Image (cartoon, rainbow, N blue to C red):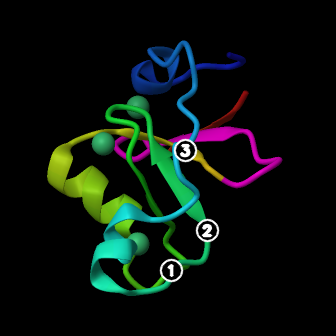
Amino acid sequence: MPDEECVHIAAVDEVKRPQRRECEDCVKSGTRWVHLRTCQECGGTRCCDSSPSRHATRHARESGHPVIASAEPGERWLYCYPDDALAEY
Ligand SMILES: [Zn+2]
Ligand SMILES: [Zn+2]
Ligand SMILES: [Zn+2]
């Protein structure tokens, strides 16, 4: 990992990829998503802040899981909520 300023991103040694390409909370509630993010703590995949429900951010706030990875094909970055830090990998 290049340029780690944040201990949470530095602690990720293998990036978790999405198991399914869908937001697990949107599937339950029948809402739609725009982009997907995968939690690096529990591996859950949820929707981004451009999506109406913003489930990834809500999950991070409720669970305290700090780091998400983009689950979009071709995007290789991690984001830490508490540090507001973005790192490509
Ligand atoms: Zn951090
Ligand atoms: Zn969602
Ligand atoms: Zn999580």
Q: Quadrant of the N terminus?
A: top right
Gap in Å between the C-alphas at discs 1 and 3?
Answer: 17 Å
Sequence-first tag of 1 and 3: 3
Toward which corner of the image does residue 65 lie, by quadrant? top left
Q: Is residue 37 above or below residue 52?
A: above
Q: Residue 34's x, y, as percent?
A: 60, 77
Q: Amino acid at mark 3?
A: Pro
Q: Is residue 54 above or below residue 78?
A: below
The dot on residue 18 is 3
Name the front one of labels 1 and 3: 3
Q: Quadrant of the C terminus?
A: top right
> Which residue sits at x=35%, y=68%?
55
Specify few, some or many for label 1: CA neighbours under 10 Å numbering under 14, 14-19, or 20 or more: some
Q: Residue 9's x, y, as percent?
A: 49, 25
Q: Which residue is mark 2?
A: 35
Q: Is residue 29 magenta?
A: no
Q: In this rendered view, identify the residue nearer to me: 44 or 48.
A: 44
Q: Which span is picked out in magenta?
A: 72-84
Say if mark 2 contacts mark 1, CB within 8 Å: yes
Q: Is residue 79 magenta?
A: yes
Q: Residue furthest left?
A: 62
Q: Main secondary structure of the magenta part?
A: loop
Q: Which residue is mark 1?
A: 51
Q: Amino acid at mark 1?
A: Ser
* Secondary structure category for the residue under label 2: loop
Sequence-first tag of 2 and 1: 2
Query: Quadrant holding ligand 2?
Result: bottom left
